[in-house]
Image (cartoon, rainbow, N blue to C red):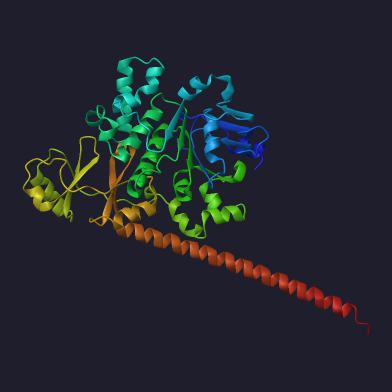
C-alpha cells in the first residue's frame, strides 16, 4: 500500500463516526527503516503507514517480522535509522526521548508493576514525574481504578503480590493511561494470563476505548485477538513489509495475497463470527435487585418473572452476585455474596458470549456496558438463532455468487464456441 493511500485512509478526525470526541492523535510512519548494525539487514524496511486518531490498530505477524520494533520506535525505545515518525504532526525526534515517553502510555505483558510500590503509587508514577500535586494524583488513581473495574477503596493500597495476574494487568493499563496520553502502546499485553481472563481484559479494553477514544497501537501474535480488538489490522511480513493494512472485515473478505490467506487460516469464514458483537443482539430485561434489598421481596419478583434466581447489582449497578430463590427468601438484606455471575461486555464477540454460556450454569450471561454497568441478559437461544440466521445468509450469498459465476462461465464458453463455429463456416469454400 502506498504512503499516499495510507495517509488518505488514516486522516485524523476530531470526532469519531458517532460524534464522540476523539482524544487520540494520528501517528504517521514515513519511510521508516531500522537497522541494529551498520550495513546489516533491516529489522524494519521502509515502513510507511498512518494510524488514525482514536482507533485501535493491531500489529500482527510471525515472529521476527518487526512488529515490536515498529511499536518501540514510536516512543523511541528503539531509534529509527531512517525515515520519520510523527505524532499529531510533530516529529518524535523534536522532543527529548524521556519527555516523549512520559507523554505516550506504554503497557507490556504482565503489567510490569514495581513490587515495592502500592497500586496507587504505581499508577501515579508518571504523573509524579510530571510534577502533579499529590491530591490530583490520588484522585486520578481512584478514577482509573474505577475505569478498569477495580474498587479503589479495596485496591488502591494493595501491593502487586496481593493481586491476581488479571488485576495486575488492569493496574498496568491504568498506569499507562495515568497522564492522559493521546497514544497508548501495548506490547502483547494479555499474553501472560489464562484464556478466560484474557477475554475479559480484551472486553475491558474495548469498553475503555469506547469511552476514551485514544489512539492505541497493540502488538499481538494472535490473529483472532487482532480481529476482535482492531479497528484496523497491520499484517507484516519479514522486514516489516506490509502484507495488508485494512479493516478486519476487508482482510477476512479479501486477503491481499497468499501470505495473508495462510496467516489468517483456512477458517476465515468462521472468523467472521468474531466480527459480530453482543451489542448487535437482542437482550432480555430480567428482574434485578440491589445490594441491601429485602431478599424475600426480590425472590417473589424473580419467581413471578420465571427466573430461578435473583441477580444482585451493587450501588453502581454492576453485577455482584447470583442468589438462588431459596437462599434469597431467607435473606433479610441482600449482599454481594452468592454464586459468581457470568458477565460479558456488550462489545464482546458472539463467539466469546457462546464460550461463556457453555461454561455457565444459568443458560445465559449478563451483559455490561460503560463502567461495567448492567444492561441486560443474553440468552443462549438468542445467540444460536443469530448464528443460524447469519450462517444461512452467508450460504445464500455464496450460492448466489456461485450461480452468477457459473452463468458467466457458461456465457463465455457459449460465446467462444459460437465464434469458433462462425470462423470454421467462413473458411469453408463452397
Judge left or right: residue 113 versus residue 39: left
In the rendered view, would you say 11 is above or below 274? above
Q: Position of residue 2 (x, y in %)?
A: 66, 40
Give the residue drawn at x 42%, y 33%: 107
Do we see residue 380 in this rendering?
yes
Q: How many marks?
A: 0
Q: Position of residue 411 (x, y in %)?
A: 70, 71
Give the residue drawn at x 46%, y 28%: 23
The answer to which of 81 and 272 lies nearer the viewer is 81
Q: In what quadrant of the picture does the C terminus appear?
A: bottom right
Give the residue drawn at x 13%, y 46%: 298
In the rendered view, would you say 359 is above or below 156? below
Q: In what quadrant of the picture does the N terminus appear?
A: top right
The answer to which of 419 and 213 lies nearer the viewer is 213
Q: Position of residue 90 (x, y in %)?
A: 58, 23
Q: Position of residue 354 (x, y in %)?
A: 34, 56
> Where is residue 65, by image quadrant?
top right
Do we see residue 91 in this rendering?
no
> Where is residue 168, by image quadrant?
top left
Extreme residue in the right direction:
429
In the rendered view, would you say 398 is above or below 340? below
Extreme residue in the bottom direction:
430
Amino acid at each position: 500500500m502506498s504512503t499516499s493511500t495510507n495517509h488518505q485512509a488514516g486522516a485524523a478526525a476530531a470526532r469519531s463516526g458517532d460524534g464522540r470526541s476523539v482524544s487520540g492523535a494520528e501517528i504517521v510512519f514515513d519511510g521508516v527503516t531500522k537497522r541494529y548494525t551498520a550495513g546489516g539487514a533491516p529489522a524494519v524496511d521502509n515502513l510507511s503507514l498512518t494510524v488514525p486518531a482514536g482507533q485501535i490498530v493491531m500489529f500482527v505477524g510471525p515472529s521476527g517480522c518487526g512488529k515490536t520494533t515498529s511499536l518501540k520506535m514510536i516512543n523511541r525505545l528503539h531509534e529509527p535509522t531512517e525515515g520519520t515518525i510523527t505524532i499529531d504532526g510533530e516529529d518524535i525526534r523534536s522532543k527529548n526521548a524521556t519527555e516523549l515517553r512520559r507523554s505516550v502510555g506504554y503497557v507490556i505483558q504482565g503489567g510490569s508493576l514495581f513490587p515495592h510500590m502500592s497500586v496507587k503509587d504505581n499508577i501515579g508514577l508518571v504523573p509524579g514525574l510530571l510534577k502533579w500535586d499529590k491530591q490530583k494524583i490520588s484522585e486520578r488513581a481512584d478514577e482509573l481504578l474505577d475505569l478498569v473495574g477495580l474498587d479503589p477503596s479495596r485496591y488502591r493500597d494493595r501491593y502487586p503480590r496481593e493481586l491476581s495476574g488479571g488485576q495486575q494487568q488492569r493496574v498496568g493499563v491504568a498506569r499507562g493511561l495515568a497522564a492522559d496520553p493521546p497514544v497508548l502502546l501495548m506490547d502483547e499485553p494479555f499474553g501472560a494470563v489464562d484464556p478466560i481472563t484474557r477475554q475479559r481484559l480484551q472486553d475491558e479494553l474495548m469498553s475503555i476505548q469506547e469511552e476514551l477514544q485514544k489512539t492505541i497501537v497493540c502488538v499481538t501474535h494472535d490473529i483472532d485477538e487482532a480481529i476482535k480488538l482492531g479497528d484496523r489490522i497491520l499484517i507484516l511480513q519479514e522486514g516489516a513489509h506490509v502484507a495488508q493494512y485494512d479493516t478486519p472485515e476487508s482482510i477476512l473478505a479479501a486477503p491481499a495475497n497468499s501470505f495473508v490467506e495462510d496467516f489468517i487460516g483456512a477458517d476465515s469464514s468462521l472468523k467472521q463470527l468474531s466480527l459480530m458483537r453482543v451489542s448487535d443482539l437482542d437482550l432480555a430485561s430480567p428482574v434485578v435487585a440491589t445490594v441491601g434489598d429485602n431478599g424475600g421481596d426480590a425472590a417473589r419478583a424473580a419467581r413471578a418473572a420465571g427466573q430461578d434466581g435473583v441477580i444482585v447489582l451493587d450501588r453502581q449497578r454492576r453485577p455482584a452476585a447470583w442468589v438462588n430463590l431459596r437462599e434469597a427468601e431467607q435473606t433479610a438484606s441482600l449482599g454481594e455474596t452468592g454464586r459468581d455471575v457470568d458477565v460479558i461486555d456488550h462489545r464482546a464477540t458472539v463467539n466469546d458470549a457462546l464460550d461463556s454460556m457453555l461454561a455457565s450454569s444459568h443458560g445465559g450471561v449478563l451483559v455490561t456496558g460503560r463502567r461495567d454497568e448492567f444492561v441486560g441478559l443474553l440468552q443462549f437461544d438468542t445467540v444460536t438463532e443469530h448464528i443460524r440466521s447469519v450462517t444461512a445468509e452467508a450460504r445464500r450469498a455464496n450460492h448466489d455468487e456461485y450461480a452468477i459465476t457459473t452463468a458467466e462461465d457458461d456465457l463465455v464458453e457459449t460465446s467462444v464456441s459460437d465464434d469458433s463455429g462462425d470462423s470454421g463456416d467462413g473458411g469453408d469454400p463452397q
